[in-house]
Amino acid sequence: MEPFRQHLFVCTQAKPEGVTSCPGNGSLRILQALERELAAHGLEREVQVTTSGCLGLCDDGPVMIVYPEGVWYRKVSEQDVPEIVSSHLQERRIVARLAWRDAPAMKAEATDHHERYRAMLKAKDEAGVLPDDINEMIRAFMPSRAVLTALELNIFTAVGRGTSAENVAREIHADPRATEMLLNALVSLNLLEKRDATFFKTLRSARFLSEDSLDNARPALMHIAHLWNRWSTLTDCVRAGTSSAGGRSEEDGVAAFIAAMDHNARERTAGVVNTIGKNGIRHMLDLGGGSSAYSIALARAMPELKSEILDLGEVIPLTQEYVRKAGLGERISTRVGDMLHDPLGENYDLILVSAICHMFSAEENRALFQRIYKALAHHGRVVVQDFILEPSKTAPRQAALFSLNMLVGTKAGASYSEPEFANWLNAAGFSDVRRVHLPGPSGLMIGTRI
């Protein structure tokens, strides 16, 4: 049984450098082209596209198979996709110049490829060579550093609609030779394209990494660039048990930090609003609300809601600007304060603690939840949005790694587990304590004051 009219399989099996592979020959670009063409022809609900592991014909890749016909296409290029969609998928006419119908030859090539690949792996293993996945993990800082430098220098904006390395170097006030080396590396990372001596943005870098795009993430990603120096102190931090910086440094930039938090919140606001619901909440306190992303989302979902944001003095002016741009100044107010020591207020229907607890020690969080309990009205709820580790504290991986981020950046912060959050909430007096899973490494912990 086939639920779709046709089913396409495209090989995306990555191989070590130097080994022929479909991704190395452009299969990922073919996937993007397929998505565009299927949508353009109204076929996205009729034709399913699935990525696959190695199909054994790597020397003739990229390889694509179309079912139910069982047609194998080889050496497919991005430029071939419109013809495949219009001719084969719409008119049921096979693109003969790309089809490979010599089954014995296909089987012989696939068998030979697998034997050569297995022999290479065996030879590496017998020689005691470091496995590729471990080697890649250790060297992962190299592409990361290249992209972060490109963001710091605003490379993607400088490339514009396409230009030379010399022009980019002139725009960013950098050395031409070094700039070209960086641009070439960005091409290898599929963030730029190079035609002759001219560099162009890819669809993704144009959308997310250039200042002329509405979806430009560079201001938020600059926070990641600021983390670089801190992470280089990880060895010393593990020895000492705390950050050598002792807190957020001046280099971090408050605006970049708040922009990063706002960017992260975008993908989570809908899930948080749906979980909280839209009834019975009129008075809300948003602790450490930063860019006010959650207050804005909740206010838009609940016309009668009024929210108060408590944050540090260096943050509140930025918060007020986000609120002003949202046009919600009459319903979202701000207050300067320290949530660990200053009065929180009283009779709130909801207190939101988003991306805060990981900055505090266990003792500080325990005390904070006691203060929150007293600030809530009866039947009021606390909602904690944060990285939540499994009891073993080894998963999700991003949450476990983020715990190290808190080690290098705070005095005593960490990612905490579901049992730890539950214990703090129960000890403070909350009832109906529960965890809500959200897509990604973060989640919600919810408690109610009875």
Image: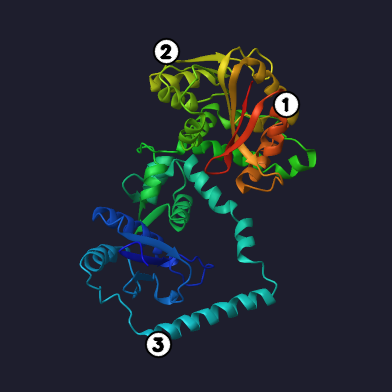
Q: Are dots 3 and 1 in contact, CB under 8 Å?
A: no
| Above or below for 325 versus 203 | above
| Residue located at (61% from left, 65% from top) | 132
Callout 2, which amino acid? Answer: Glu
Between marks 2 and 1 in the image, the one whose residue lies nearer the viewer: 1
Q: In the image shown, does 43 or 225 lie closer to the viewer?
A: 43
Callout 1, which amino acid? Answer: Arg
Choose the circle earlier in sequence order: 2 or 1: 2
Choose the circle earlier in sequence order: 2 or 3: 3
Identify the residue position indicated by label 1 in the image: 366
Identify the residue position indicated by label 3 in the image: 104
Callout 3, which amino acid? Answer: Pro
Dot 3 crowding, Cα within 10 Å, few <14, some 14–19, many 20+: few
Identify the residue position indicated by label 2 in the image: 330
Please state if 434 lies on the left or on the right of 214 as rendered: right
| Residue located at (50% from left, 39% from top) | 221
Image colouring: rainbow
Choose the circle earlier in sequence order: 3 or 1: 3
Asked which secondary structure carries label 1, the reply is helix
| The C terminus: image quadrant | top right
| Residue located at (42% from left, 45% from top) | 169
